[in-house]
Image (cartoon, rainbow, N blue to C red):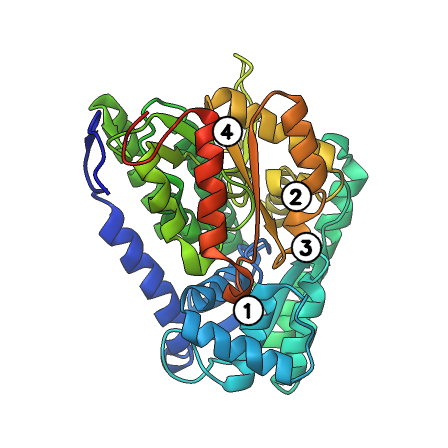
Amino acid sequence: MPTKTIYKTAPLKTWKKAKELRDKYYEDYAKAHDRGGLRWAGGAWTFSAIPSGLGEDVWSLTSEPYGASIAFDKAMSLRCLEAAEKASYARDLCAYMRNYWGSVILNEYAFGGPFPKPDFIWQDHICCSHAKWYQVVSDLEGGIPQFCIDVAVGPYKDVTEHKIDYLVNQMHDGIDWLEKTTGRTFSDELLISAVKNEFRTTSTWAEICALNKTVPAPLDEKTMYALYVLGTLNKHDATTADFYEELRDEVKERIDNNIAAIANEKCRLMSDTQPPWGFLSIFRYMEQFGALSVGSLYTFGLIGIWEDKPDGSWGPRETPMQQGIDITTRDQALRLYADWTLAKPEWQHFYSPHIKTEMMIRIAKEWQLNGILLHYNRGCEGLSVGIAENRLGLIEAGYPVMSFEGNMGDEREFDEARVKARFDAFMETLGFKGNGKA
């Protein structure tokens, strides 16, 4: 549909590199055994820097991004979902999990060939399905060794030393388990390097998201989905940390040159939780109204680590290295790592919907939003818990809210025509019409 041009646009220079890094990640995992290396599986939120201490030939497969990749391929996703259902796994379970299990059951890898079996499972547990997800994977694959760290110690604002101790003691136990399970000697030097990389990755991603406060926004959320995912795959790796610093510099360059994500930006929105991955075209549909999503708590806080800045704004957390801290021992690295990770915004609202509402209101104010889109996502109980309370809180704060039903990983539960009709009506209430007319 034609749109009225207001701002300059240009493709991201780093776009091709982001795709190459993603493809390499999945290829490295598949070929790990051919290279004499190790493979492990676990969630995108797990303490992925720790297995790096086993050597430089250790590759991972993080579960949620893999499930999302399957969901994007509707035909494969349907095969996987039906295989999981045929194996008697309930349809109301996590959609990512069901896609993943189906991939294992069918022995189909989303990136070609048979499913590459991991040597061990390294997981953490905060969402209701995390540990059970891999218990099933272990059973399906004939008994894969598994270690899981319980991170549910309460919101970060209430963190105490004994809560940090609780995580760190589990991490130490986990390192002992990794050595016994793999027969390898653990390297503290590799651990410290990986932890530092993760600090850089997660702080820089938050900095990139904070740059989207600019009007016009240099990035739109659909584009950001292809960028943030690297931090969910390989957040502890130097190539990811280096890439995000390169991307940050390019986003700053776009701002300096007034280059926008969309040419006709007039309405700034944010979304919530995972999108329906099989229907990302909905974000392009929004552009005919001059509307874009500048991000979301999900996109900003799934991997980004934030803090309050001296001026009262929300910005990237200063890394230990930026604070002049010299990390020299295993225990010091683990303690800093535990504290850092517990600050993750997307972990906070597992404890209370009011915490999430406060963060969303903060984004709405600082990113200068006109409205908010809430995905009543049947596919993710963890990130959708309390969403009705979030809606009420946002409305009470004065923000227009559009809710829609769907599922991030099961395309059978998303009605595209209905969602577009709701969006048309929502934009009309905000005073915007399609085809670039206001």
Identify which residue is drawn at 81% across, 40% down: 162
- Crowding at dot 4, Cα within 10 Å, few <14 / some 14-19 / many 20+, comes out as many
Q: Which-is-in-front pick, marks 4 and 2?
A: 4
Decide which of tag 4 and tag 2 comes sooner along the chain.
2
Decide which of tag 1 and tag 2 comes sooner along the chain.
1
Q: Is residue 163 visible?
A: yes
Q: CA distance from mark 4 to mark 2?
A: 24 Å
Decide which of tag 3 and tag 1 comes sooner along the chain.
1
Identify which residue is drawn at 76% across, 41% down: 351
- Crowding at dot 3, Cα within 10 Å, few <14 / some 14-19 / many 20+, comes out as some
Q: Quadrant of the N terminus?
A: top left
Which amino acid, by three-letter code, is at mark 1? Ala
Residue that carries the numbered disc 2 in the rendered image: 347
When asked about the image quadrant of residue 35, the answer is bottom left
Residue 41 disc label = 1
At mark 1, the secondary structure is strand
Circles 2 and 3: CB atoms closer than 8 Å: no
Against 327, is 216 above or below? above
Residue that carries the numbered disc 3 in the rendered image: 381
Against 202, is 89 above or below? below
